């Protein structure tokens, strides 16, 4: 049974959790991903950090496909559009609590390394063979 990707659900849940705890939600996005519309003068090493708190943005929309909102950058109003695959992390500015997501290399991930219908994790090493043993370390 194939399931939809978990990333959009986690982004929305963490956003709500961060705001409920009276912290400032920051979104880290891959500014070089296809379809991303962000102010390029604020991009650093291909990434952008955006304050997505309710007081900083207007008309915030988080769907299973994208995050979009209206904001001001350097006094200029701008519409921001970030495909959900370009979201790299969401965290609270005050304490850094949140979640970092794996970078999606391609649209068709290796089935041995995918969970949640597209979110990727590292392969676990195979179980060692033989009898387990413990060693006392002083």
Image (tube, rainbow, N blue to C red):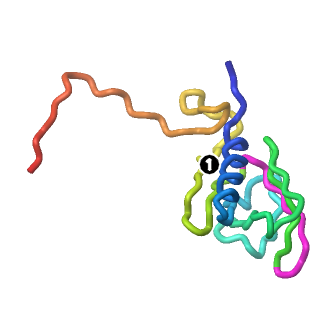
Image: 48 above or below 132: below
Does any portion of residue 60 appear in the rendered image? yes
* Quarter of the image that includes the N terminus: top right
Q: Residue at x 68, y 56 (%)?
A: 20
Q: Secondary structure at mark 1?
A: loop
Q: Is residue 66 magenta?
A: no
Which residues, given as a range, are shown in magenta? 74-85
Q: Position of residue 75 (x, y in %)?
A: 87, 81
Q: Is residue 79 magenta?
A: yes
Badge 1 is on which residue? 103
Horizontal relation, residue 47 to residue 73: left or right: left
Image: 89 above or below 71: above
Judged from this view, the residue extending furthest toward the bottom is: 75
Comparing 40 with 22, the one in front is 22
Horizontal relation, residue 26 to residue 75: left or right: left
Comparing 119 with 34, the one in front is 119
Callout 1: few (<14), some (14-19), or many (20+) C-alpha neighbours within 10 Å?
A: some
Q: Position of residue 99 (x, y in %)?
A: 58, 52
Judged from this view, the residue extending furthest toward the top is: 1
Does any portion of residue 29 appear in the rendered image? no
Q: Residue at x 62, y 67 (%)?
A: 93
Q: Quadrant of residue 135?
A: top left
Magenta stretch: dominant secondary structure: strand
Q: Quadrant of residue 7?
A: top right
Horizontal relation, residue 129 to residue 123: left or right: left
Image: 65 above or below 82: above
Q: Residue at x 69, y 60 (%)?
A: 27
Q: Position of residue 127 (x, y in %)?
A: 33, 27
């Amino acid at each position: 049974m194939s399931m939809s990707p978990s990333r959009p659900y986690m982004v929305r849940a963490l956003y709500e959790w961060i705001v409920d705890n009276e912290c400032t939600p920051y979104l880290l996005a891959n500014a070089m991903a296809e379809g991303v519309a962000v102010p390029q003068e604020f991009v650093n090493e291909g990434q952008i950090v955006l304050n997505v708190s309710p007081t900083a943005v207007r008309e915030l929309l988080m769907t299973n496909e994208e995050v979009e909102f209206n904001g001001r950058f350097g006094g200029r109003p701008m519409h921001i559009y970030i495909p959900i695959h370009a979201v790299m992390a969401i965290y609270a500015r005050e304490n850094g609590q949140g979640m970092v997501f794996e970078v999606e290399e391609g649209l068709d991930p290796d089935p041995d390394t995918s969970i949640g219908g597209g979110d990727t994790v590292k392969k676990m090493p195979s179980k060692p063979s033989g009898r387990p043993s413990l060693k006392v370390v002083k």
